[in-house]
Amino acid sequence: VLLTTSLINTYYIFSPSLIQKSEARETSEDKEKEHGKNIINQVKIEGLERASEEYVRSVILSREGKELDPITLRQDIERIYNLEIFDEVKAEFKEGTLIFKLKEKPIISDIQVEGRKELSEEKFKEVMKMKKGDFLDRRKLKKQIDDIINAYQKEGFIFTKVIPQIEYLPQNRANIKLKIKEGEKYYVKKIVFSGSEKIEEKQHLKYLQTKETSTLKRIIGEGKLDLNLLEGDKDNLRNSYLDSGFIDAEIKSPAVIFNPAREETLIFFRVSEGPRYKIKSINIEGDMLFKKNQIKQNLKAEQGEYFSRKKVIEDIEWISSLYQDIGFAQVRVNPLISKNIEEGKEEGEVSLTYQISKGNIFYIRRINIKGNTRTRDFVIRRYFSLLEGQIFSRTSIMKSYIELMRTGFFEKVDINPVFLQDGKVDLDIEVKEGRVGAVSLGGGFSPQFGNFFQSLFLLFQGQISNFRGLGQNLGIYLAIGGGFAFFNLFFQDDHAFDTDYIMGVNLFRYQSFFLPFLKISTGGKFNTGLFLTERTKFVLSPGMEILDVYDRRTGGRIPFYQDDIGAGFFRSNSRFLRAEIRNDTRDNIFAPTRGKNIILWSKIGGVFGGDLYFVKGGIASSFFFPLKWGLVFSPNIRIGLGGGLTSSRFLPYPERFFAGGIYSIRGFDYFSLGPKRQYVSPSGAVSQIVLGGNKSVISNFELIFPVSKQIGLFLVLFSDVGQVFAEYQNINPADFRASYGIEIRWISPFGPIRLSFGLPLIRKKGDALRLFDFSLGLFTFYPELEEY
């Protein structure tokens, strides 16, 4: 008996006695003799060099003491071959011994790559899966070559070739050399829609993944030709027509014309538009668990409008969600479309019917959590809105997904329902853990600290965002610059002891040049609170801060300063209590597109003793509204009010409000707005002091353009308005300052980077301006900004 399999073909050769009955009549004695001949007495494996014999035997089902079965033997050969470590597998049966004769694939001794220039090291490593020590599998080698070519094509290098060279060595080893011949990089100059007459070109372009290039887009790497995307754009273009009522539209495969001299391409889509259809009627049929009017009031498709595939899909989602939220997890909504068009007309009508089949009601049997190598199960369940035994709810599952992703603990979250019999469903939650923490050393530039050299800083940060897998945050920040030094150590647990209670602590020390003074503050605070709702929390923070003030010119301590209205500062020991209620529904912290962040806060000094007696509070609110074309409109307002609790009623200087700079009113210098007083230092130097105010009103209005979401680049048009007012002043809009301008924001791997160009819209003589401003680095180091 001989069985052989190879890369090309599989051959099976059996003796007739094993696969067919003899036409002659067999006696029982003959059967017993034949049966005895085919009993396996021993199984041998030959030809192993590196592979484990136990590993091979684990897939063999032909065993000693069993009769040789041709079907089982053929399957054994296939299973051994599917281990993907053998070039050849033979089986030989002789005198009761079954021998598997194997020939191992060569081991890859070395891999060399020549000619790679345009594809970055990082992207090449992402696709290069073969490595030294692997078995040389020609199918895997071909796939590896295809992956490299595809990686080049995604970057616009369409005609790249990869030529493999294999050098076989003694001891069944091999060297691989991949010679890459990089093609030219092509960009998409123009996309032409031939036959498109009734829809504007710009609508089609929005649907396509392939984008036209421009000078700016080339700089940021957009507009490259990717043939893999182009074929899918045929369907995307048809969707553009379906969303505009052209149900019968036909799209031909795109044609690409290359211009090697300019490294550009023209892409042609040939279109047959066909008639356009309006919706004549909308009906709902089938298993009706809701009133028709209740369903219809939220439908996107409307009678009298042109048919839209997108709106029909949204309607199906809406109707399905109604049923799935009351347990009918497998509801089916089938759109039935009946077309009617008169001969010779360019427009017709459709009757649209949503046919509902509710299916069975489902209850959660079990919630299974997988992939959490670090995060505890109960931490994940904390953010999940459903429990075992509860009715299935699609909205609750989607809400749970959002909450899990918002934690920042996971790179990926998948929630998959597994439907069982008797109306039961298991929910499999599979997570991919994010990084346990980050330690980085970086730097930046924050011009609010003084001149160029004073504004440079070095930053060290270390943070564990999911400490001990319990969802706790532990971190340390240290920044040193020419104009300041900052240290902060913090611990925060938003669900202490697996409850809705919040506990945390902050210890800090910072020094900064502030106008003619050097301020040094040392202190800390303890945070405690609870979640009022899933997105609303209340935090109470008792703390203390010791403040020293020095003259920047002489270096001498200023024990006390007070101007003619009593608003002054001195070496102080502040003991305070701070309270905050925050409601945060933003979909993203760094680049939100919808939601709001509203903060109500108050702070009282002297409640535990100390030198500063005051009370202040306010509101800070940010709103984000998505518009067309990915634009986001964001109005923000901050209002603050405070006063002293001593006989003077003046808010102490360290607690006053300030305005100006990139974090409040752009176009004006940092903390330069508001009432001023003359200050004469002990050395006799005269300077102006910005007193700040006990009242603050600041508004920012921003229109955010996503230049490239892929790299986190945004363009912002802004207008800022506001001012701070002292105790002896009333809030007077006539004293407001205003500015407008443009800002570039980049959510870089090192943190948010902002470049702002602001022009004063309303200013007065003596105002200090800062037309160009930018902030590089992760944080602002002014604790005063904590008061929003």
Image (cartoon, rainbow, N blue to C red):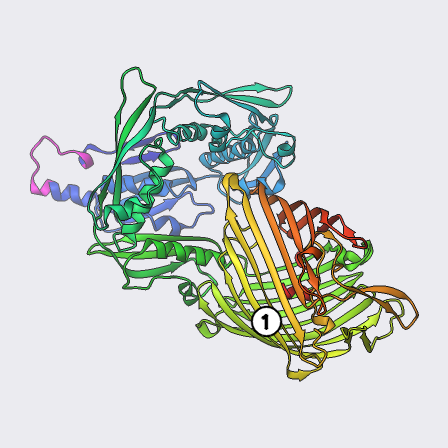
Above or below, 502 against 42 in this view is below
The residue nearer to you, when weighing 129 against 39, is 129
Q: Is residue 23 magenta?
A: yes
- The answer to whether one can see residue 409 in this image is yes
Above or below, 493 against 296 in this view is below
Left-right relation of 102 to 42: right
Give the quarter of the image for residue 246: top left
Dot 1: element: strand
Above or below, 758 against 170 in this view is below
Q: Is residue 633 magenta?
A: no
Q: Residue furthest top?
A: 344
Tell me the kind of residue under disc 1.
Ser
Report the predominant secondary structure element of the magenta stretch: loop
Above or below, 56 against 154 in this view is below
Q: Provide the residue designation for mark 1.
A: 602
Residue 627, percent from left and from top = 50, 43
The magenta stretch spans which residues?
A: 18-30
Residue 687, percent from left and from top = 86, 64
Disc 1 crowd, CA 10 A, few/some/many (<14, 14-19, 20+): some
- The answer to whether one can see residue 99 in this image is no
